[in-house]
């Protein structure tokens, strides 16, 4: 038996592509081959949605079991869920997510990113956290051989997603220069990576994992200006902002920016499509609930509605073909939490605790007596900070710390060690760095 791809896209995919071609042809050109073929099927899900509205007598459409007008369920499960109704737990969520949750997350984006006010962007689509959002970006926009530009201080999962899975090339540039974000290096790398390419994917993760760095307002303006200049030069840019640690700003050593680059880039230029990945995972301290969002910010305000509708349909198709939908219970819990009148105070309390840990780390790690063991990379946000160790291999140091002292840290390169101060109490900071110093000296 021989198999081959269909000679022509599905009519629904073709219709979406035609809409993009008419409204924003540059966005159609940004799509991967798979992205062009994607569509949301008018099958069981759409028929079930129609039945939900009109089938007032009998509804025998969706593939769940019901009893007494609600999803069938087991008391052994339900007894752990308090007053949450079975319909908010067991039934399938829409492929794009619960509508009230999407709307309340959009309101949150406006509140925390005032520069978005007046701009046109898509309604956030629910993902199974940010890793799933990255996979969707890869599926929709990345072909084998494409270049993805990322600073060299990066989360290792990017390589699995873009290099291993998609077959793309990750191009990097030095994250730091003179104790700050390397704006000039980014501008050069952007121009070099764009040379000979019609499309470039750029991924920026702030606050950064592993460094814990959030750019200043001036640095954010410089980054946005470089992207705009490259878009004006004719490169089609898919710019992804991984905002996993958004809101955890401590302003160590000076004030950092507090808005996502997505707010600056949305509507900036027709050749620039901004994509925001964020979620409740870190922002609401619910890591295991796996609830995130992907939001599209097109460059043409006049075509934004058409572009966002087409991209949402394709994203729903990718979700439907991959995981079907994100867990209903996770979405219900996040939706209710965001509607709670005490959520802001609760978040502020946890953020203050993390800030106290970060401040203690900044104080301890920079003590002069440790200067012979490491240099501290600038950090001001998030969960992490990094040191560049001197005279020893970071991986050997990591193993030595684990074997001799029972201390677990992460080696992110041959010279860099990442410390997750998010899981250190304030009084644990100095003992940890003292052991790190001792281990470096022993190996050196």
Image: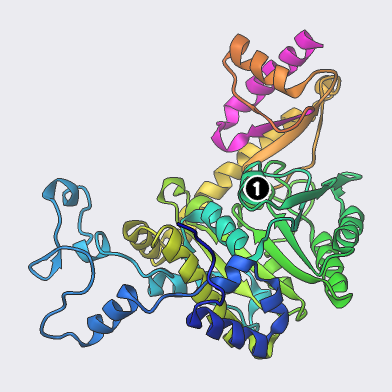
Q: What percent of the width, then of the height, locates residue 320?
A: 42, 65
In x, y percent, where is residue 396? 71, 17
Give the camera-side residue of 54 and 275: 54
Q: Nearer the viewer, residue 298 or 33?
A: 33
Q: Quadrant of residue 322?
A: bottom left
Q: Is residue 15 visible in the rendered structure shown here? A: yes
In terms of depth relative to the viewer, which is nearer, 6 or 356? 6
Residue 230 position in % (x across, y down): 86, 70
The residue tagged 1 is 158
Helix, strand or loop at mark 1: helix
Residue plotted at (36% across, 70% down): 94
Q: Is residue 363 above or below residue 258?
A: above
Q: Mainly helix, strand or loop, the magenta region?
A: helix
- Magenta extent: 415-444
Is 227 on the left or on the right of 104, as rendered? Answer: right
| Magenta span includes 88 | no
Give the x, y percent position of residue 331: 38, 61
Can you say which quadrant of the picture contains the C terminus?
Answer: top right
Could you tell me which quadrant the N terminus lies in?
bottom left
Residue at the spot x=34%, y=66% of the render?
Answer: 93
Can residue 362 be seen here? The reply is no
Residue at image x 20%, y 54%? 82
């Amino acid at each position: 038996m021989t198999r081959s791809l269909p000679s022509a896209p599905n009519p629904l995919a073709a219709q979406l592509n035609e809409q993009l071609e008419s409204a924003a042809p540059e966005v159609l050109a940004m799509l991967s081959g798979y992205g062009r073929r994607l569509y949301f099927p008018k099958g069981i899900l759409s028929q079930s949605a129609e039945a939900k509205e009109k089938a007032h007598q009998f509804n025998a459409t969706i593939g769940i079991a019901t009893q007494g007008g609600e999803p069938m369920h087991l008391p052994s499960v339900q007894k752990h869920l308090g007053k949450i109704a079975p319909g908010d737990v067991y039934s399938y969520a829409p492929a794009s997510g619960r509508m009230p949750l999407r709307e309340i997350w959009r309101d949150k984006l406006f509140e925390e990113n005032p520069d978005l006010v007046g701009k046109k962007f898509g309604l956030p689509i629910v993902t199974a956290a940010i890793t799933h959002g990255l996979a969707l970006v890869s599926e929709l926009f990345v072909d084998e051989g494409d270049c993805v530009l990322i600073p060299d201080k990066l989360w290792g999962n990017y390589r699995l997603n873009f290099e291993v899975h998609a077959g793309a090339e990750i191009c990097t540039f030095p994250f730091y220069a003179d104790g700050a974000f390397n704006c000039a290096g980014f501008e050069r790398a952007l121009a070099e990576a764009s040379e000979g390419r019609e499309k470039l994917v750029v991924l920026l993760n702030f606050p950064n994992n592993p460094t814990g760095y959030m750019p200043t307002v001036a640095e954010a303006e410089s980054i946005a200006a470089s992207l705009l200049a490259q878009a004006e030069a004719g490169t089609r840019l898919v710019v992804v902002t991984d905002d996993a640690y958004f809101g955890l700003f401590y302003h160590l050593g000076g004030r950092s920016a507090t808005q996502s680059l997505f707010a600056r880039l949305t509507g900036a230029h027709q050749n620039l499509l901004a994509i925001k990945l964020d979620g409740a995972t870190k922002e609401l301290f619910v890591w295991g609930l796996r609830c995130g969002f992907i939001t599209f910010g097109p460059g043409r305000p006049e075509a934004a509605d058409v572009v966002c509708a087409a991209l949402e349909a394709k994203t729903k198709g990718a979700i439907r073909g991959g995981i079907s939908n994100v867990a209903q219970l996770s979405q219900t819990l996040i939706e209710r939490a965001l509607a709670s009148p005490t959520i802001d105070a609760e978040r502020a309390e946890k953020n203050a605790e993390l800030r106290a840990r970060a401040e203690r780390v900044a104080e301890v790690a920079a003590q002069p007596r440790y200067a012979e063991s490491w240099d501290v990379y600038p950090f001001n946000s998030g969960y992490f900070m990094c040191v560049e160790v001197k005279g020893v291999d970071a991986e050997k140091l990591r193993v030595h710390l684990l074997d001799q002292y029972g201390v677990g840290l992460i080696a992110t390169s041959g010279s860099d060690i990442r410390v997750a101060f998010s899981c250190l109490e304030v009084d644990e900071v100095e003992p940890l760095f003292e052991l790190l110093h001792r281990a470096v000296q022993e190996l050196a």
